[in-house]
Every structure is written in structure tokens, then in C-alpha cells.
Amino acid sequence: MNTNSDTQSVGGGRISRRALLKGSALAGAGLAAGLHIERAAHAAGSDVLKVGLIGCGDRGSGAAVNALNADANARLVAMSDLFAENIVRSRQNIANLKGDQVAVKDDHCFAGFDGYQKLLATDVDVVLIALPTFFHPTYLKAAIDAGKHVFCEKVHAVDAPGVRMVLAAGEAARKKNLSIVSGLAWRYDTGVRETMKRVLDGAIGEIVSIDTFCNTGSLRCRQRQPPWTEMEYQIRDWFNFFWLSCDLPGLNLVHNLDKAAWAMRDEPPLRAWGAGGRQTRVGPQFGDAFDHFAVFYDYADGVKLHAYAQQQDGCTVAICDHFRGTKGRCDLLCNRIEGETKWHYAGPGCNRFDLEHVALFSAIRSGKPINNSLYMARSSLLAIMATWVCYTGQSITWEQAMKSNYALAPKTLALSAAPPTLPDARGNYPIPLPGVTRFA
Amino acid sequence: MLFDRSLSSRRDFLKTAAAVSVAALPIARSAHAAGSDVLKIGLIGCGGRGTGAAVNAMNTGKDVRLVALADLFPEQLKNSLAQLRQAKPDQVAVSPERCFIGFDAYQKLLATDVDVVLIATTVHFHPTLLTAAVDAGKHVFCEKAHALDAPGIHMVIDACAKAKQKGLSLLSGLCWRHAPAVRETIDRVHDGAIGEIVGIQANYCVGGRRAYPRRPDWTEMQNQMLNWYNFRWLSGDQSSAQLIHCLDIVSWAMRDVPPEKAWGMGGRQVCLEPRYGDLFDHHATVFEYANGLRSFGFCRDQPGCYDEYSTVLIGTKGRAFAPYKCWIEGANPWKYKGAAGNMYDLEHQTLFDAIRKGSPINSGSYMATSSMLAILSQMVCCTGEQLTWQQAMQSKHDFRLPRYGWDVEPPVKPDPSGQYPTAVPGVTRFA
């Protein structure tokens, strides 16, 4: 792992990722020897693949169903979450849908901040990671260290040290013949893939400009409950806290940025700049999140990417990815190409959430590992840049972003511990001020 | 008290002004065609830009004489006159009885025998003054923005048409239209140097909006008039105050065909003190043109942030950049190497040459459209709604007051803590 992320200290100190990983690293070491053999055995295709779910919220539960849909011989055998009741509810919901494929015994349910370590110490083959984003890079690395194949939800990191962990985990997975599939699901959508294939083959010529929007209504807020500590409240309401979610670019816009990155062959931009703020979602219940972002990216060859995100009720809804080329244009979500080449995807629809798991399980079965880590890292950094340029009002280069050691994390991970942002006497959280807030 | 004047409605002003001067004027105008007479100019609005405009006008020839001034505030008029006398001692001939103060000052100025008026007041008054000046048979230079609402835009359109009928010149202060480098850039774009335009950025991000802390002896109306940049009903917002320059260049590149619709986002994130009035401090507007082309209008006036003042035209064969540095990259690379020129002098040269030659110039083909682009930006960012050009043009929302005076309550008032209410997208509705 990257040493920078171990030694930095922000605002008086942060949790050491190394400390967080120690337990799992040990567990991984114990298992590592036997694992290559175990993985290879699945190539036959008929064996049961044991799945562990880390993060039993809606998306995690959904991912588990998608995984079980994708492979009839997949069995959900272990679950972990920060909160025990999430596991109970999720296990029941998944069992209702997937009956026999759910075989999670009580002693394979692990709650708490170290639940993932206990899960990784079991004999699961595949883990599905879907938590508040803050935990993703740490858990991803631990899972690879433990010799597991991984499906990891987006966004994959909330800061550059996390992005570097994703890259390192990707490298480690390659050496261990482990698969990593990203929850950036559009990459697995049939119509989008077919369309993108043509764009990359030159159907619209060279791309010169991209417009991509994810402007929707307000995202959810969890109401604070009396027994919750501040840490518990923030984790349960994680959409509204930057340190947990990377704000709207991490929650939503990353999908758009990822599609743009794909069209740009995953080459990074030179820089980004933009503006944002919170104008309608004001008050303690909205944490420290902005409600709108407008970001421009400049690429080396002069290509401009215009990315907007908004979460405001009663405002214009705009969701699209438009690529403009020298010979035409592409409306990606409509699977349509216009200009010199006219083409429209007319094939059947698909469930991209199932398909990403089909890809993962096929890779495991065929013994040909799939590894999405490069674009996972880069698209996540695009989202991190979007957040940062809007928070600071500055122009930030890709290089600056990639090298950044800034990370916001609690000193201790415990429900009784203090989160890295705290409300003032009136319950309001400090909000980024462009021109004042600095990128570090 | 200088400010203590009872005022009638704008419509009454206009009637009076029109009645006074219309009959005699076409003859007076044609006299200048000979080129020998002195051109008498009057300045309405004696702030920094107005004072600058008067100098630009006088730079066009010794035959230009400044003879009358009008402003809301006597100190401002006095300061302006002193500066102008110093800059152009031979061309300033303003007698005390031709210094007019107050909300009706412009009427008195228009009732004098000035040939040309320069209008550079608080934007709120521009359409009214422009209309009155044309009705009074004056040639006009009018600073941007030209209006803050759709009714004002219609007044501008009507004034331009009327000026044409009357053989009067009417020139807009959208100054980049007169900058040689930008003219050549747009010419090249129109000639196909970058192929078909497929994307546009119009960026006006510059830190720090001028805002004065309120003085205890000011009435609320005085405070807002002196701090007019910071009130939507007086200045529009940054869209009308600054971004309009980039939107105007975009519109020019688009041959002044308006977009079909627009939507946007914005807010007040940093400029939160009472002196910043009711404005947003950033706007991100998306203008959608007929062929699906999008123009991204982007402005920010928060201090300490990244600054970017540029118009970027993205084409299928290259990109064109303006206005401070003008160049084209791609299939037909080019860089402007000519003289920069002073566009403010050049715009007045164009105006006064037109007047002297008796071949009137008229900015009507673009000045209303470009002003409306800025208004549309404000409308969509404040409401969060997507609006068609047509909807916006048909808006009845009118910032004008039934009556003006220092005793009048301004339409926006501070709360007990001194804060002015801002727009809330999704709640504030288009009208």
C-alpha cells in the first residue's frame, strides 16, 4: 500500500489505514498459500462459488441478488455490515428473492467495524463490497490481500490516497489471478457497450467535446435518532457527508464521468475547474453536501468535458451523455449515433447490474481474471477532482490530484468516536467556501 | 434636499421628453452630415463607465463637445466633471445649469439641444432612457446591459426600430464587437475556419464584486442605488453585468440567432454579507441551440478563486479562442497579430463617424438578443426551471417601479439581520 496514506495527518491526525488493515492482512497471509489452488478449481464451472456480502444496505442487497442471478451455483454464505439489523433485514430480503442460494448461518453474520475482517477470514470465494464510499479502498485492498475475487461498488475512493490503494489492489489482484469488477455499471450495459464500441472505432470521428449531466432531485436524508452518536448518524446519513461519500460527484456524477473517461480511452484530463454550492439544501439535515456542481475538464488534445450535477427538488432534470466528434455525435444513453454514420442500437434491453456480475462470475469460472481497477481508480479521481474544484474554486491538475495526500478520516473508527466533521452549536456543519477552502 | 423630488411615472417622463423635442430634430441631425458642425454630447450616468465613455466619445474628434451631465447623485456628477475637464479641457463645456441631478435629470438633459447622449446608468434605467433619448431625437450610445427583463427588451427593440425610422444612430456598448482581434476571429469562424461549431464555453470568472458597506445615513433606496451592482432589480446579476460580454461574442458567432431554450444552476456560496445584496455569486447556464448545440455560460465573482475570462468555440475542425487573446487551433491555425486597438474608442469612432457622415448605425440586430441571453441566464439559474426563448421573451415580469424617489421603498428589503433574500431554485418561480 502507499506509504503516504499511512503517514499523513490532517486536522490533527487521521486513522492509519495500515492499522485498519493489520487484522485482515494477517488473515490474508494465513489464507494466501492455499488460495491459488482454490481459485483455479472453479474453472470447471460446476462448483459452488461462495459469496460474502460486505455492506448490507439497499445497494449491497441488490448486488447480492444480481450476483446470485448471474451464477446459479453462487451461494451467499456470509454477510457483514456496520449495523447488525441491516444484516438481518438484508438476509431476509435476499432470501425472499433467491431462496436456496442464500445460506448464511448466524455465525457467518459479522457486525461492526471489524466485521469485514471476520468475513474475509471465512472461506468465501467472492466478496461484494457496497458501503459508504469511505470504506471502499480499505476493504478492497483487504479483500485482495485475503485472496478473494471482488465486486466493488462505485465510487471507489473519496481521496487520492484511496485512489492509489485501488491501483495497488488492482496490481496485487493481477499477480494473484483475482478478478475485480467495478460497480460502474454502464460499462456492462449492452446497448451502451455496442454504442461505445462504435464511438471508439471512429463512428463520430475524433471526439472534440462532451456534455454530461446528472441533474436530479434531492437525495435522501436520514433523520437523526436519539440513541445515535454523531458518528452513527453521519454513517447512516452518509450521502450528506463529504468524508463518507465524496458528495454528489461520488454518488452520481461519477457514472457520467466514467462514461466520458471510457470515450476518452481512460486517458486522464490535464485539469479541471468549476463552481458549485448549496442553495436549496440548507440546514443541518443536509450535512456538508453541496446541491449543485458544474465542472469543466480540459484534455491534452483540446477536448472539453462539461459535467454538471445537481440534487435540487423542483428544478430541471437533465441526465445524458453527449459526445461531439469531427464526423458526428453520439447520444450514449439513447444508444444513438448521428452524422456521417447513422446507427441506433436495436437489440434487446438488459439489466446492467446483473451483467456486471455475469462478467465477474464468468471470469472466475473461466480462469481468465477480469480487472477493472485502472478505470475504477481514474474515474473515481475524476469525481474527487469535481468535488475539490467546486469546494475550493481553484483549477486543479490531474497530477496535483493524483499526488494529493489529503484525506479526511476519523482518528478512531468506533461509533463512540468523533467523526472528522462536527456540527456547531446550532447543528450546522462547516460548508466548503470556494476561495477560502484549500485543496491539500 | 437635492434628492427630495416628487417624481411622476416613467411613462409621463417619456411623453414629456418626446413632446419637447421631436419636431425640430431631424433637421438638426442632417446638419451634421456636412461634418463641420460641433457635435454636442450629454452624459447620463456619471460613474466610472459613463465618464470613460465621455472620454472615448471626445477622443473621436475635436468637434465633439460635452455640454450636459445628468446623474442621480451630485457628488458623482461633480467628480466626473472634474475628471473630464482635466482629461479634455478644450472639449468640456458644461455650464452649471446643464448639470442635472435626480431621477428626472435625464429628462432635463434630453430637453437641451444635445445631439448625442451617452447612457451609462444603473442598468435598471437603460431601456427607459434609451426610449426617451430616441423619442427626443438624439443619437445614442447605450452601455450594456440594455435591459433586465423581457418588457425592457421589448422597449429596446422598439427604440432600435424607432431610431432607424428617424435616421438616428444607436450604438450598443457591447464593446467586443469593435475589437479588431475579436472581429477577425469571428470572421474566420464564420468563414469555416473551425468547421461546424459543436460546443461553446462562455466563461467570465473574476473575483470580487464591488460592494459598499451600508452607511447609517443612507436610506434603503440610497443604499441600493449606490450599491446597485448587488441588486437584481438594478443590475440583473453577474450574467448581465459581465457574462453578457461572452454571451454576446457567442451570439455573434451564432449569427445572432437565439437559442431554443436554457437551464442552469447557481447560488450564493461565499458573498454572504448584506453588502452583497440579493445576488448569486456563481451561475452555470446551459443554452441549447436549434441543432442540439450547447453553449455553457459560466460566471463567478467569488474572491480568491480561479479566474477565467474566455469564449471558446469548439468546432469539428478546430477551436477558436477570444476575446483577450485571440487564436484558432486545429486545421486552420491562426493567431491575431494586428494592433490591439482600444475598443472603447473604436466603438465611439464608429458611432461618431456614422453621425458625421449621415449614415446612421444601429445595433438593433444584436443588442436586444445579447441582453436577453443574460436575462435568460438569470431566470433559469434563479428558478431552476428550463425555459424556452419564447417563454422568456413573453415574460411579463417587470422590475420597473411605479414611481421613483428617495422616499420610495425599494422592491427588495433586508431582514432584521440586514440580509436580503436570495432566489431559491425550485421555489422561486418564473413569472
Image (cartoon, rainbow, N blue to C red):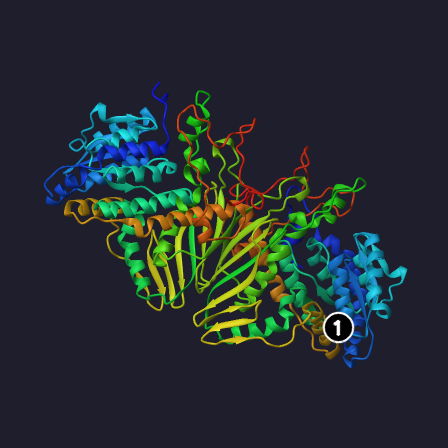
- Residue B206 in view of the camera: no
Q: Position of residue B319 (x, y in %)?
A: 38, 62
Q: Nearer the viewer, residue B206 or B99?
A: B99
Name the residue at the right extreme.
A106
- The residue type indicated by label 1 comes to Ala
Q: Position of residue B176 (x, y in %)?
A: 31, 50
Q: Chain of mark 1?
A: A
On the picture, is A266 further left or further right than A411?
left
Q: Which residue is mark 1?
A: A70
On the picture, is B231 further left or further right than A62?
left
- Residue B25 in view of the camera: yes
Does residue A332 lie above or below A312 as drawn? Answer: below
Instruction: Please state, as top left, top right, bottom left or bottom right, where the N terminus of chain B lies in the image.
Output: top left
Residue A172: image quadrant is: bottom right
Asked which secondary structure carries label 1, the reply is helix
Q: Nearer the viewer, residue A236 or B60?
A: B60
How many numbered discs, if any? 1
Name the residue at the top extreme.
B1
On the picture, is B417 further left or further right than B37?
right
Name the residue at the bottom extreme.
A44
On the picture, is B80 further left or further right than B207?
left
Q: Position of residue B43 (x, y in %)?
A: 26, 34
Mark 1 surroundings within 10 Å by alpha-carbon count, few (fewer than 14), some (14 through 19), many (20 or more): many
Q: Position of residue A96 (x, y in %)?
A: 84, 64
Q: Nearer the viewer, residue B127 or A161?
A: B127
